[in-house]
Image (cartoon, coloured by chain):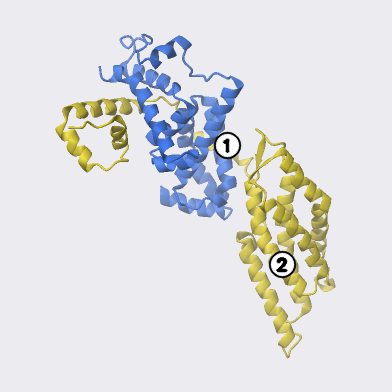
Chain colours: A yellow, B blue
Amino acid sequence: MTHLEEEQLVLYYYGELETADLEKHLGECESCRRAYQNLQRVLNSVDGFPVPERPADYESRVWSALQHHLPRARPRMKWLAWKPLAAAAAMAGLMAAAFFAGQFSKKPQTVAADPRARERVLLVAVGDHLERSQMVLIELANAGAPKDGSLDISYQQRAAEDLVESNRLYRTTAANAGDVATASLLDELERVLLEIAHSPSRVSGRQLDELRKEIEDRGILFKVKVFGQQVEQREAAPENAATL
Amino acid sequence: MEDSDSVAVARAKAGDGDAYRELVDRHSRGVFRLAFRMTGNEHDSEDVVQETFLRAYRQLHRYEARSSFATWLYRIAANYSLDLVRRRKRRGDVPLTAPAEDDGVERARGIPSPQPDPERLAFSGAIQERVRQAMDELSRQERTAFVLRHFEGQSIEEISGALGLSENAAKHSIFRAVQKLRRALEPLVTS
Protein backbone atom coordinates (compact mmCIF):
# COMPACT_ATOMS: atom_id res chain seq x y z
CA MET A 1 0.00 0.00 0.00
CA THR A 2 1.33 3.47 -0.92
CA HIS A 3 1.49 5.76 2.09
CA LEU A 4 0.14 9.28 2.04
CA GLU A 5 2.61 12.10 1.56
CA GLU A 6 2.94 14.89 4.07
CA GLU A 7 1.66 17.41 1.52
CA GLN A 8 -1.55 15.42 1.11
CA LEU A 9 -2.03 15.37 4.87
CA VAL A 10 -1.52 19.13 5.07
CA LEU A 11 -4.06 19.78 2.31
CA TYR A 12 -6.48 17.38 4.01
CA TYR A 13 -6.07 19.19 7.34
CA TYR A 14 -7.00 22.46 5.66
CA GLY A 15 -9.90 20.97 3.70
CA GLU A 16 -8.24 21.53 0.34
CA LEU A 17 -8.34 17.92 -0.84
CA GLU A 18 -10.97 15.39 -1.90
CA THR A 19 -11.52 13.31 1.20
CA ALA A 20 -13.16 9.99 0.31
CA ASP A 21 -10.10 7.94 -0.75
CA LEU A 22 -7.84 9.63 1.76
CA GLU A 23 -10.14 8.97 4.69
CA LYS A 24 -10.49 5.36 3.63
CA HIS A 25 -6.71 5.04 3.62
CA LEU A 26 -6.39 6.70 7.02
CA GLY A 27 -8.90 4.23 8.38
CA GLU A 28 -6.84 1.31 7.12
CA CYS A 29 -3.23 2.46 7.58
CA GLU A 30 -1.98 2.91 11.13
CA SER A 31 1.29 4.50 10.04
CA CYS A 32 -0.45 7.27 8.06
CA ARG A 33 -3.04 7.71 10.80
CA ARG A 34 -0.27 8.27 13.34
CA ALA A 35 1.48 10.71 11.00
CA TYR A 36 -1.76 12.65 10.57
CA GLN A 37 -2.42 12.73 14.32
CA ASN A 38 1.06 14.18 14.90
CA LEU A 39 0.45 16.79 12.23
CA GLN A 40 -2.87 17.67 13.86
CA ARG A 41 -1.17 18.11 17.23
CA VAL A 42 1.47 20.39 15.75
CA LEU A 43 -0.95 22.56 13.79
CA ASN A 44 -3.46 22.70 16.65
CA SER A 45 -0.68 23.87 18.95
CA VAL A 46 0.00 26.79 16.60
CA ASP A 47 -3.45 28.12 17.52
CA GLY A 48 -1.85 29.05 20.83
CA PHE A 49 0.33 31.68 19.14
CA PRO A 50 0.20 34.47 21.70
CA VAL A 51 -1.25 37.77 20.54
CA PRO A 52 -1.32 40.70 22.99
CA GLU A 53 -4.79 41.60 24.21
CA ARG A 54 -6.22 44.96 23.15
CA PRO A 55 -8.02 47.24 25.61
CA ALA A 56 -11.82 47.19 25.84
CA ASP A 57 -12.13 50.52 24.01
CA TYR A 58 -9.73 49.50 21.25
CA GLU A 59 -12.21 50.04 18.40
CA SER A 60 -12.90 53.62 19.55
CA ARG A 61 -9.19 54.34 19.77
CA VAL A 62 -8.60 53.02 16.26
CA TRP A 63 -11.45 55.14 14.91
CA SER A 64 -10.29 58.28 16.75
CA ALA A 65 -6.82 57.99 15.25
CA LEU A 66 -8.16 57.08 11.83
CA GLN A 67 -11.00 59.51 11.19
CA HIS A 68 -8.73 62.56 10.91
CA HIS A 69 -6.92 60.93 8.00
CA LEU A 70 -9.99 59.89 6.04
CA PRO A 71 -10.82 62.14 3.07
CA ARG A 72 -13.88 64.20 3.93
CA ALA A 73 -16.92 63.89 1.73
CA ARG A 74 -17.67 67.31 0.28
CA PRO A 75 -21.30 68.43 0.20
CA ARG A 76 -22.72 68.44 -3.28
CA MET A 77 -25.89 67.55 -5.11
CA LYS A 78 -26.24 63.93 -4.08
CA TRP A 79 -27.55 62.58 -7.35
CA LEU A 80 -24.60 64.15 -9.15
CA ALA A 81 -22.05 62.85 -6.65
CA TRP A 82 -23.39 59.31 -6.71
CA LYS A 83 -22.60 58.33 -10.31
CA PRO A 84 -20.78 61.01 -12.31
CA LEU A 85 -21.24 59.28 -15.65
CA ALA A 86 -24.91 58.55 -15.06
CA ALA A 87 -25.39 62.16 -14.01
CA ALA A 88 -23.56 63.38 -17.11
CA ALA A 89 -25.66 61.14 -19.34
CA ALA A 90 -28.85 62.37 -17.67
CA MET A 91 -27.74 65.98 -18.11
CA ALA A 92 -26.81 65.44 -21.73
CA GLY A 93 -30.19 63.78 -22.33
CA LEU A 94 -31.94 66.69 -20.67
CA MET A 95 -29.94 69.15 -22.73
CA ALA A 96 -30.69 67.26 -25.94
CA ALA A 97 -34.39 67.12 -25.09
CA ALA A 98 -34.37 70.84 -24.36
CA PHE A 99 -32.49 71.50 -27.59
CA PHE A 100 -34.92 69.53 -29.77
CA ALA A 101 -37.88 70.97 -27.91
CA GLY A 102 -36.50 74.40 -28.80
CA GLN A 103 -36.05 73.34 -32.43
CA PHE A 104 -39.50 71.94 -33.00
CA SER A 105 -41.75 73.44 -30.39
CA LYS A 106 -44.39 75.87 -31.53
CA LYS A 107 -44.20 77.43 -28.08
CA PRO A 108 -40.73 78.97 -27.77
CA GLN A 109 -41.38 80.34 -24.27
CA THR A 110 -41.71 76.92 -22.56
CA VAL A 111 -39.04 76.23 -19.94
CA ALA A 112 -37.51 73.37 -21.96
CA ALA A 113 -37.14 75.56 -25.00
CA ASP A 114 -35.83 78.59 -23.13
CA PRO A 115 -32.11 78.99 -24.01
CA ARG A 116 -31.41 80.38 -20.55
CA ALA A 117 -32.99 77.34 -18.90
CA ARG A 118 -30.85 75.08 -21.09
CA GLU A 119 -27.77 76.98 -20.13
CA ARG A 120 -28.64 76.74 -16.43
CA VAL A 121 -28.87 72.97 -16.73
CA LEU A 122 -25.44 72.85 -18.35
CA LEU A 123 -23.98 75.30 -15.85
CA VAL A 124 -24.98 73.21 -12.84
CA ALA A 125 -23.71 69.99 -14.37
CA VAL A 126 -20.42 71.39 -15.68
CA GLY A 127 -19.77 73.22 -12.40
CA ASP A 128 -19.92 69.98 -10.46
CA HIS A 129 -17.83 68.17 -13.06
CA LEU A 130 -15.13 70.85 -12.90
CA GLU A 131 -15.09 70.68 -9.11
CA ARG A 132 -14.42 66.94 -9.22
CA SER A 133 -11.77 67.34 -11.91
CA GLN A 134 -10.08 70.09 -9.94
CA MET A 135 -9.79 67.81 -6.90
CA VAL A 136 -8.00 65.14 -8.94
CA LEU A 137 -5.59 67.68 -10.45
CA ILE A 138 -4.86 69.25 -7.05
CA GLU A 139 -4.20 65.86 -5.46
CA LEU A 140 -1.63 65.05 -8.14
CA ALA A 141 -0.09 68.50 -8.16
CA ASN A 142 0.38 68.37 -4.37
CA ALA A 143 1.36 64.71 -4.04
CA GLY A 144 4.45 64.20 -1.90
CA ALA A 145 7.65 62.60 -3.16
CA PRO A 146 7.15 58.89 -3.93
CA LYS A 147 8.18 56.55 -1.12
CA ASP A 148 10.09 53.40 -2.02
CA GLY A 149 10.55 54.69 -5.56
CA SER A 150 6.92 54.87 -6.64
CA LEU A 151 3.58 56.43 -5.73
CA ASP A 152 0.17 54.76 -5.88
CA ILE A 153 -2.11 57.03 -7.95
CA SER A 154 -4.71 54.34 -8.67
CA TYR A 155 -7.40 56.35 -6.87
CA GLN A 156 -6.80 59.45 -9.02
CA GLN A 157 -6.42 57.28 -12.12
CA ARG A 158 -9.78 55.64 -11.59
CA ALA A 159 -11.40 59.01 -10.90
CA ALA A 160 -9.85 60.40 -14.11
CA GLU A 161 -11.25 57.45 -16.09
CA ASP A 162 -14.77 58.25 -14.86
CA LEU A 163 -14.28 61.95 -15.47
CA VAL A 164 -13.10 61.43 -19.08
CA GLU A 165 -16.40 59.73 -19.90
CA SER A 166 -18.55 62.46 -18.41
CA ASN A 167 -16.23 65.14 -19.84
CA ARG A 168 -16.91 63.84 -23.38
CA LEU A 169 -20.65 64.10 -22.89
CA TYR A 170 -20.46 67.65 -21.50
CA ARG A 171 -18.03 68.76 -24.22
CA THR A 172 -20.28 67.41 -27.00
CA THR A 173 -23.35 68.93 -25.37
CA ALA A 174 -21.65 72.32 -25.00
CA ALA A 175 -20.44 72.23 -28.63
CA ASN A 176 -23.93 71.34 -29.86
CA ALA A 177 -25.37 74.20 -27.82
CA GLY A 178 -22.88 76.58 -29.47
CA ASP A 179 -21.03 77.26 -26.20
CA VAL A 180 -17.54 77.44 -27.71
CA ALA A 181 -15.70 78.60 -24.57
CA THR A 182 -17.05 75.74 -22.43
CA ALA A 183 -16.40 73.18 -25.16
CA SER A 184 -12.83 74.46 -25.60
CA LEU A 185 -12.01 74.26 -21.89
CA LEU A 186 -13.50 70.78 -21.63
CA ASP A 187 -11.42 69.73 -24.64
CA GLU A 188 -8.21 70.81 -22.90
CA LEU A 189 -9.29 69.22 -19.64
CA GLU A 190 -10.03 65.97 -21.42
CA ARG A 191 -6.46 65.74 -22.74
CA VAL A 192 -5.04 66.04 -19.23
CA LEU A 193 -7.57 63.60 -17.77
CA LEU A 194 -6.65 61.10 -20.48
CA GLU A 195 -2.95 61.43 -19.60
CA ILE A 196 -3.78 60.61 -15.96
CA ALA A 197 -6.20 57.80 -16.85
CA HIS A 198 -3.58 56.17 -19.09
CA SER A 199 -0.74 56.43 -16.57
CA PRO A 200 0.39 53.37 -14.64
CA SER A 201 -1.33 52.93 -11.27
CA ARG A 202 2.07 53.33 -9.60
CA VAL A 203 4.26 56.10 -10.97
CA SER A 204 7.92 56.84 -10.45
CA GLY A 205 9.13 60.28 -9.41
CA ARG A 206 9.97 61.04 -13.05
CA GLN A 207 6.53 59.99 -14.30
CA LEU A 208 4.86 62.07 -11.59
CA ASP A 209 6.94 65.09 -12.62
CA GLU A 210 5.85 64.58 -16.24
CA LEU A 211 2.20 64.53 -15.21
CA ARG A 212 2.66 67.68 -13.14
CA LYS A 213 4.41 69.36 -16.06
CA GLU A 214 1.48 68.48 -18.32
CA ILE A 215 -0.91 70.06 -15.82
CA GLU A 216 1.28 73.14 -15.37
CA ASP A 217 2.13 73.68 -19.06
CA ARG A 218 -1.52 73.75 -20.03
CA GLY A 219 -2.35 75.96 -17.06
CA ILE A 220 -5.38 73.75 -16.78
CA LEU A 221 -5.73 73.99 -13.02
CA PHE A 222 -5.84 77.78 -13.19
CA LYS A 223 -8.30 77.76 -16.11
CA VAL A 224 -10.59 75.29 -14.38
CA LYS A 225 -10.51 77.35 -11.20
CA VAL A 226 -11.34 80.61 -13.00
CA PHE A 227 -14.03 78.92 -15.06
CA GLY A 228 -15.51 77.37 -11.92
CA GLN A 229 -15.72 80.81 -10.29
CA GLN A 230 -17.46 82.18 -13.36
CA VAL A 231 -19.91 79.32 -13.23
CA GLU A 232 -20.65 80.07 -9.57
CA GLN A 233 -21.27 83.74 -10.41
CA ARG A 234 -23.55 82.82 -13.29
CA GLU A 235 -25.44 80.42 -11.06
CA ALA A 236 -25.86 83.15 -8.46
CA ALA A 237 -27.15 85.61 -11.10
CA PRO A 238 -29.27 83.57 -13.50
CA GLU A 239 -30.88 86.60 -15.06
CA ASN A 240 -27.53 87.66 -16.47
CA ALA A 241 -26.68 84.22 -17.77
CA ALA A 242 -25.13 84.23 -21.19
CA THR A 243 -22.65 82.07 -23.00
CA LEU A 244 -19.52 81.82 -20.83
CA MET B 1 -21.40 39.11 9.43
CA GLU B 2 -20.75 39.00 5.68
CA ASP B 3 -24.27 40.22 4.84
CA SER B 4 -24.07 43.05 7.32
CA ASP B 5 -20.60 43.88 5.99
CA SER B 6 -22.02 44.14 2.47
CA VAL B 7 -24.71 46.52 3.66
CA ALA B 8 -22.17 48.63 5.54
CA VAL B 9 -19.83 48.68 2.52
CA ALA B 10 -22.66 49.86 0.24
CA ARG B 11 -23.54 52.63 2.70
CA ALA B 12 -19.87 53.61 3.11
CA LYS B 13 -19.48 53.79 -0.68
CA ALA B 14 -22.40 56.21 -0.73
CA GLY B 15 -20.44 58.44 1.67
CA ASP B 16 -21.92 57.32 5.00
CA GLY B 17 -19.05 57.81 7.50
CA ASP B 18 -20.92 55.94 10.26
CA ALA B 19 -21.04 52.85 8.04
CA TYR B 20 -17.26 52.84 7.66
CA ARG B 21 -16.92 53.18 11.40
CA GLU B 22 -19.05 50.03 11.77
CA LEU B 23 -16.58 48.17 9.57
CA VAL B 24 -13.66 49.47 11.62
CA ASP B 25 -15.41 48.39 14.82
CA ARG B 26 -16.02 44.89 13.48
CA HIS B 27 -12.60 44.20 12.03
CA SER B 28 -9.96 46.24 13.86
CA ARG B 29 -9.15 43.49 16.41
CA GLY B 30 -8.99 40.87 13.67
CA VAL B 31 -6.65 43.01 11.58
CA PHE B 32 -4.46 43.58 14.66
CA ARG B 33 -4.25 39.82 15.32
CA LEU B 34 -3.33 39.12 11.71
CA ALA B 35 -0.72 41.90 11.73
CA PHE B 36 0.83 40.67 14.96
CA ARG B 37 1.01 37.11 13.71
CA MET B 38 2.84 38.39 10.67
CA THR B 39 5.11 41.07 12.14
CA GLY B 40 5.54 39.80 15.69
CA ASN B 41 5.70 43.44 16.74
CA GLU B 42 2.98 45.28 18.64
CA HIS B 43 3.93 48.77 17.44
CA ASP B 44 4.14 47.67 13.80
CA SER B 45 0.80 45.91 14.14
CA GLU B 46 -0.89 49.14 15.24
CA ASP B 47 0.66 50.82 12.22
CA VAL B 48 -0.76 48.05 10.02
CA VAL B 49 -4.26 48.53 11.50
CA GLN B 50 -4.27 52.26 10.72
CA GLU B 51 -2.79 51.92 7.26
CA THR B 52 -5.07 49.02 6.33
CA PHE B 53 -8.26 50.92 7.11
CA LEU B 54 -6.94 54.03 5.39
CA ARG B 55 -6.02 52.10 2.23
CA ALA B 56 -9.30 50.19 2.30
CA TYR B 57 -11.25 53.45 2.50
CA ARG B 58 -9.39 54.89 -0.45
CA GLN B 59 -9.87 51.71 -2.47
CA LEU B 60 -13.44 51.02 -1.41
CA HIS B 61 -14.81 51.92 -4.85
CA ARG B 62 -12.73 49.04 -6.23
CA TYR B 63 -14.14 46.43 -3.88
CA GLU B 64 -16.62 44.42 -5.93
CA ALA B 65 -17.73 41.75 -3.48
CA ARG B 66 -16.11 38.88 -5.40
CA SER B 67 -14.65 37.91 -2.04
CA SER B 68 -15.97 38.80 1.41
CA PHE B 69 -15.07 42.23 2.73
CA ALA B 70 -13.03 40.61 5.51
CA THR B 71 -10.96 38.59 3.01
CA TRP B 72 -10.35 41.71 0.93
CA LEU B 73 -9.43 43.75 4.01
CA TYR B 74 -7.09 41.10 5.40
CA ARG B 75 -5.38 40.88 2.01
CA ILE B 76 -4.57 44.59 2.28
CA ALA B 77 -3.34 44.06 5.85
CA ALA B 78 -1.21 41.05 4.86
CA ASN B 79 0.44 42.88 1.99
CA TYR B 80 1.17 45.94 4.08
CA SER B 81 2.57 43.75 6.88
CA LEU B 82 4.79 42.07 4.32
CA ASP B 83 6.01 45.47 3.05
CA LEU B 84 6.72 46.54 6.61
CA VAL B 85 8.73 43.43 7.43
CA ARG B 86 10.69 43.81 4.16
CA ARG B 87 11.52 47.43 4.93
CA ARG B 88 12.69 46.52 8.44
CA LYS B 89 14.81 43.74 7.00
CA ARG B 90 16.41 46.14 4.50
CA ARG B 91 17.17 48.58 7.30
CA GLY B 92 18.63 45.79 9.39
CA ASP B 93 16.08 46.17 12.20
CA VAL B 94 15.75 43.12 14.40
CA PRO B 95 12.18 42.05 15.16
CA LEU B 96 11.26 42.30 18.82
CA THR B 97 10.52 38.60 18.98
CA ALA B 98 13.71 37.50 17.19
CA PRO B 99 15.44 34.63 18.98
CA ALA B 100 19.11 34.53 19.87
CA GLU B 101 21.34 33.28 17.06
CA ASP B 102 22.56 30.04 18.67
CA ASP B 103 19.05 29.16 19.76
CA GLY B 104 17.87 29.55 16.14
CA VAL B 105 20.52 27.13 14.89
CA GLU B 106 19.37 24.50 17.34
CA ARG B 107 15.76 24.94 16.32
CA ALA B 108 16.60 24.79 12.63
CA ARG B 109 18.01 21.33 13.31
CA GLY B 110 14.81 20.39 15.06
CA ILE B 111 16.49 20.10 18.45
CA PRO B 112 14.29 21.35 21.27
CA SER B 113 15.87 24.28 23.09
CA PRO B 114 16.54 23.69 26.78
CA GLN B 115 15.21 27.23 27.53
CA PRO B 116 12.62 27.90 28.69
CA ASP B 117 12.51 24.67 30.65
CA PRO B 118 9.07 23.09 30.15
CA GLU B 119 9.30 21.54 33.60
CA ARG B 120 9.59 24.92 35.21
CA LEU B 121 6.99 26.70 33.10
CA ALA B 122 3.35 25.97 32.63
CA PHE B 123 3.14 23.54 29.73
CA SER B 124 0.85 25.75 27.63
CA GLY B 125 3.14 28.70 28.23
CA ALA B 126 6.10 26.69 26.96
CA ILE B 127 4.23 25.71 23.83
CA GLN B 128 3.20 29.28 23.19
CA GLU B 129 6.78 30.43 23.53
CA ARG B 130 7.99 27.72 21.19
CA VAL B 131 5.28 28.53 18.64
CA ARG B 132 6.33 32.18 18.71
CA GLN B 133 9.96 31.22 18.18
CA ALA B 134 9.08 28.76 15.42
CA MET B 135 7.00 31.39 13.61
CA ASP B 136 10.00 33.75 13.67
CA GLU B 137 12.01 31.08 11.88
CA LEU B 138 9.73 31.19 8.83
CA SER B 139 10.64 33.26 5.81
CA ARG B 140 8.41 36.28 5.13
CA GLN B 141 6.56 34.54 2.31
CA GLU B 142 6.14 31.33 4.27
CA ARG B 143 4.85 33.20 7.27
CA THR B 144 2.37 35.26 5.27
CA ALA B 145 1.01 32.29 3.34
CA PHE B 146 0.78 30.20 6.50
CA VAL B 147 -0.95 32.91 8.55
CA LEU B 148 -3.52 33.50 5.83
CA ARG B 149 -4.18 29.75 5.49
CA HIS B 150 -4.07 28.70 9.12
CA PHE B 151 -5.45 31.68 11.03
CA GLU B 152 -7.57 33.45 8.44
CA GLY B 153 -8.90 30.35 6.71
CA GLN B 154 -8.15 31.67 3.22
CA SER B 155 -7.95 29.15 0.41
CA ILE B 156 -4.72 28.55 -1.50
CA GLU B 157 -6.35 30.20 -4.50
CA GLU B 158 -7.12 33.33 -2.46
CA ILE B 159 -3.61 33.37 -1.00
CA SER B 160 -2.00 33.11 -4.41
CA GLY B 161 -4.13 36.07 -5.54
CA ALA B 162 -3.30 38.10 -2.44
CA LEU B 163 0.45 37.55 -2.70
CA GLY B 164 0.75 37.58 -6.49
CA LEU B 165 2.08 34.00 -6.55
CA SER B 166 1.12 31.00 -8.62
CA GLU B 167 -1.09 28.54 -6.75
CA ASN B 168 1.79 26.09 -6.74
CA ALA B 169 4.16 28.61 -5.17
CA ALA B 170 1.57 29.54 -2.53
CA LYS B 171 1.00 25.86 -1.76
CA HIS B 172 4.72 25.17 -1.40
CA SER B 173 5.19 28.17 0.87
CA ILE B 174 2.60 26.64 3.17
CA PHE B 175 4.21 23.20 2.97
CA ARG B 176 7.62 24.60 3.86
CA ALA B 177 6.11 26.53 6.76
CA VAL B 178 4.39 23.40 8.09
CA GLN B 179 7.62 21.39 7.77
CA LYS B 180 9.56 23.96 9.79
CA LEU B 181 6.85 24.21 12.43
CA ARG B 182 6.71 20.47 12.62
CA ARG B 183 10.45 20.16 13.17
CA ALA B 184 10.31 22.76 15.91
CA LEU B 185 7.11 21.72 17.66
CA GLU B 186 6.64 18.00 17.19
CA PRO B 187 9.15 16.98 19.91
CA LEU B 188 7.20 19.11 22.36
CA VAL B 189 3.60 18.32 21.48
CA THR B 190 3.89 14.61 20.73
CA SER B 191 6.06 13.64 23.68
Amino acid type shown at disc 2: Tyr
- Is A48 left, or right, of A101 in this rendering? left
Determine which of the numbered discs, if any, sits on residue B101 in the image.
none
Q: In the picture, residue A170 is in which quadrant?
A: bottom right
**Up-down: is B37 above or below B8?**
above
- SS of the residue under disc 2: helix
- Is A76 left, or right, of A9 in this rendering? right
Binning the other alpha carbons within 10 Å of mark 2 as few (below 14), some (14 to 19) or many (20 upward) gives many
Whether residue A54 is visible: no
Image location (x, y in percent) of residue A37: 24, 28
Q: Residue at x 55, y 51 (%)?
A: B62
Image location (x, y in percent) of residue B9: 51, 51
Amino acid type shown at disc 1: Glu
- SS of the residue under disc 1: helix
Determine which of the numbered discs, if any, sits on residue A170 in the image.
2
Determine which of the numbered discs, if any, sits on residue B51 in the image.
1
Q: Residue at x 26, y 25 (%)?
A: A38
Quadrant (top left/top right/bottom left/bottom right) for the C terminus of chain B: top left
Cα gap from disc 2 to disc 1, whole angstroms = 37 Å
Q: In the picture, residue A161 is in which quadrant?
A: bottom right
Image location (x, y in percent) of residue A146: 69, 36
For the residues labelled 2 and 1, say whether their Cβ atoms are less than 8 Å apart: no
